[in-house]
Image (cartoon, rainbow, N blue to C red):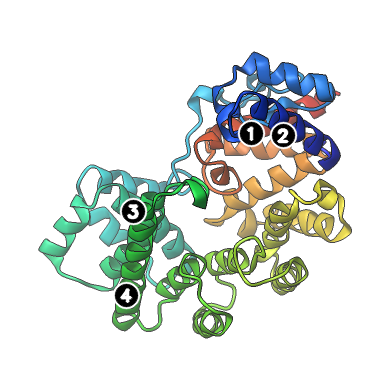
Amino acid sequence: MALQIGAKTRVLMAMRKEAKARGLSVQKYMGTASHQELIALIRQVDPTVNPAEIVPGLPDIPPVDVTRWGMPPEAALSTDLSRPVPVVGAAVAAARAGDWRPAADLLERSYGDWAMRSVAVHALGEAAADDGAWMRAWRATAGENRHFAAVEAHGLLWLGWKLRGSRPGEETSPMQHDAFFQTLRRSEAASHRAIELAPDDPTPWSTLITLARGLSYDPDQFAAHWRELQARDPLHRTGHEFALMYWSPEDGPGSYDSLFAFADRAAAASPSLAFLVLQAAFDYEARDENIWRDAMVQRALDLVLRWLSTPAGGGGVFADSDRRWAAYALVSAGRGAEAVPLFAHLGVDASGRPWEDYNDDAAAVFDSFRRRACAAVRS
């Protein structure tokens, strides 16, 4: 069962009190205190609280050996975005080794398959942000074309967020902020160049939708880009995912009512977009973790599970993404036993959302949730 908000608040208040007594921020205290100290404090406040839900990396209660359910050990987990789709993984591996040709070939062969292109450009963009040597070799040998331009635009988006880092705004230096915005502006310009080279391709429009939050697009500017994306691919999954993030009241101009309404409309349009309701619940859960038992969220969760049972849903390039959202939602809703087959299918793949939102703790949080799922089978 997901941690109830009252218990979480009491634990965090106790941590703030202890941190203040030591002259530290809560974050600094959590980073310097030993696991034993943190667990002792949590159990003192509420012995029923799962420490792993307060501090990722702390042990679950009870401990569970997931290998008994055919799952790999925690040490084998990977956060590599390219792993779920083998052909993308092969192109990314070649690019990281300096060979751009498999990436160019994949993007040429799959042009028009916008789902595959979205996944490939997203993963190749991360590889470009990590090391741009293979992109420079691509340009030098083949010149600029529609495939190179799409990857370049998305790679600059990735680079901007990597330069900024994952720390809160108040812990980010002015130099990091400047590098972030300058790089996102370069990504924006590169996206428009990609649009010129491939007017029918929704991919660079999706990159612009992804940029909207970081560049603080106003609603009219966002709406104009959204219309262009919809004109090319009305059910574009990545575009919908990042549109939802733009409308989140945590970062953007929306409200939770509009957030859930957007997600629910998308789910009604296609079961391939039902995961958006789970994404909205993930965004809302810090306010009230009972959201996972809400009727609309439960309907969407069941719709995702039914979609995964079909050839189109269970065999598509976004199937593992749906499994991640469904597994997280099932555990959070107290239906952990149903998530065991999903985690078994994911195997070592701890990439993508919602796990990647935990940054360096992504694999640890993934492991925590699958152990809770297995524990639900035993209980």
Q: Mark 2 belongs to which amino acid? A: Val
Q: Secondary structure at mark 3?
A: helix
Q: Secondary structure at mark 4?
A: helix
First along the sequence among labels 4 and 2: 4
Residue hosting label 2:
340
**Depth-wise, is mark 4 or mark 3 nearer the camera?**
3
Residue 200 vertical placement versus 3 (above, below)? below
Q: CA distance from mark 4 to mark 1?
A: 42 Å
First along the sequence among labels 2 and 3: 3
Q: Measured from the top left, where is residue 158 in percent x and y?
A: 38, 56
Q: Measured from the top left, where is residue 120 in percent x and y?
A: 40, 58
Q: Are marks 4 and 1 in contact (CB under 8 Å)?
A: no
> Which numbered tag is attached to residue 116?
none
Residue drawn at (83%, 35%), measured in percent from left and top? 7
Residue hosting label 1:
344
Q: CA distance from mark 4 to mark 2?
A: 44 Å
Q: CA distance from mark 2 to mark 1?
A: 6 Å
Residue 4 lies in quadrant? top right
Q: Residues within 10 Å of mark 2 (few under 14, many from 20)?
A: many
Q: Measured from the top left, where is residue 369 in percent x and y?
A: 68, 34
> Which numbered tag is attached to residue 175?
3
Task: Name the quarter where the N terminus is drawn.
Answer: top right
Residue hosting label 4:
189
Total marks shown come to 4
Q: Mark 1 belongs to which amino acid? A: Ala
Q: Please indicate whether residue 61 sits to the left or right of residue 362 in the image.
A: right
Q: Measured from the top left, where is residue 49 in percent x and y?
A: 80, 27
Q: CA distance from mark 3 to mark 1?
A: 43 Å
Q: Residues within 10 Å of mark 1 (few under 14, many from 20)?
A: some
Q: CA distance from mark 4 to mark 3?
A: 21 Å
Considering depth in this image, is 17 or 161 the residue closer to the camera? 17
